[in-house]
Structure formats: structure tokens, C-alpha cells
Image (tube, rainbow, N blue to C red):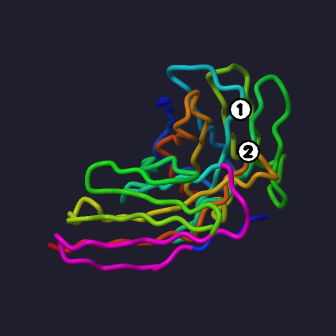
Amino acid sequence: GAVVSQHPSWVICKSGTSVKIECRSLDFQATTMFWYRQFPKQSLMLMATSNEGSKATYEQGVEKDKFLINHASLTLSTLTVTSAHPEDSSFYICSLRDRGVDGYTFGSGTRLTVV
Amino acid sequence: GIQVEQSPPDLILQEGANSTLRCNFSDSVNNLQWFHQNPWGQLINLFYIPSGTKQNGRLSATTVATERYSLLYISSSQTTDSGVYFCAVMDIHTGNQFYFGTGTSLTVIP
């Protein structure tokens, strides 16, 4: 199956600063990547769909100006949490579709804590 | 969107015991996957199983698409099986969006 590398694994930042999370496809080209958010003790919710070379598609209720997504190449998508606040503290996970029939592969996730 | 419900929400097992986790979904799906989220948060893909039955070691899964449910079987459970198990489906109408279930939190005690 596909290999997805997500960095950083965890990050602590001060309120008001911005944080960038990277998601890389290591062994094949992904035209579409997905970003999920998971609050403690809750399930995963899709935030946005990242499309290579075009604007991301955001789910209802997700602020596009706060969560900037850039899919600049076929192997890299980034999520930038701008002007982070404590309520943005969460677990962020990227995903991409496997080239085979194995379904979707997920990154290892990034635990963001805003203090 | 499609509703995905998992049961039980919490499960505590003695090491060596067997268990069955259930996932019900409200509409037709063209993709269903079971994931194990370990204590560090990493999602491990267990099965891609939109229909039929698959087995991988002590784990097996069955999806009955016509009746809109899937089952994950864990046999001879081990402490390393602890974590949260998620079922995620993709319905035939929206295409790319995964809908995750509420999860089953499993604790295996020695």
C-alpha cells in the first residue's frame, strides 16, 4: 500500500501563531489528499479535500481563511493553522487514496496543542 | 450525510478472549474500511472490505452490504489490540468523503 509521511507528529504553539503541517506521499503521486480533524474522545471529521494545482474544497463549518491548504505538488499537501487558538487544539490527520484496491491510507497524525 | 454507528462503544476483555465489533451504516456504500487507532493516535488500516469476508491472522471482517452492516472479529485478544477501532464508509453519492463511525474503545487486560 501507499506510504504517507506526516510531520510534525506533535507541536505546541502559542496562541496567535501559525503552524504548518506537512503530508507527503512517499511512493506515488496523489492528485487528491484529505485532511481530517479529531477532537479528544471523538471520531474523525473531514475538514477539506486538497486538490493538486487547484483550490481546496472545504467542508461546511470549516474556516478556509483559518485552515490554509496548499497542494503544490503531487506528493505534498500542507495544512497551515493560522492565528491558532486553544480551541484549535486537536489531532490532525491527512489521507490519500491508495493506487491499488487497498482503499485509503492515513498519515500518522499531528497532535496540535495551542497554549 | 451517511450515518455510521458502531457498537459497543466500550469493551474490556481479558487477554485471550474473542470479541465482535459491529458497524451499521444508513446508506449504500462503495468503500468500507476498518481502522485501529493506537494509543499514539496512529490509524492502522486493518481491512478494506466493501463486501464479503477477509481474514488477516487473528482478525477477520465481514461486510453484508445489502443489510448495511459490517463486523470485525478479534480472536485470542492481546494487550496490543487495545485502542480504538473505527469503521469508515464512503457512500455512493458523495464519492470521496469518508464518514467515520463513533468508534469502539477496546481495552485488553492481562
> Which amino acid does the dot numbered 1 rest on?
Thr
Circle 2: element type: loop
Residue at 53%, 39% (x, y): give it: A105
Q: Nearer the viewer, residue B4 or A24?
A: B4
The residue positioned 60% from the left and 74% from the top of the image is B5
From the viewer's perspective, is B105 left or right of A80?
left
* Left or right for A52, reference B83: right
- Location of mark 2 (residue): B96
Q: Toward which corner of the image does residue B11 lie, by quadrant? A: bottom left
Q: Chain of mark 2?
A: B
Q: Which residues are magenta?
A: B6-30
Task: Looking at the picture, tell me which residue is in the foreground, A66 or B105.
Answer: B105
Residue A29 covered by magenta stretch: no
Callouts 1 and 2 close, C-beta under 8 Å: yes
**Residue tagged 1:** A32
Q: Position of residue A68 (x, y in %)?
A: 76, 40
Does residue A25 sit above or below B66 in this rendering?
A: above
Image height of A102 relative to A12, above or below: above
Residue A98 in picture, x, y percent from top left: 57, 32
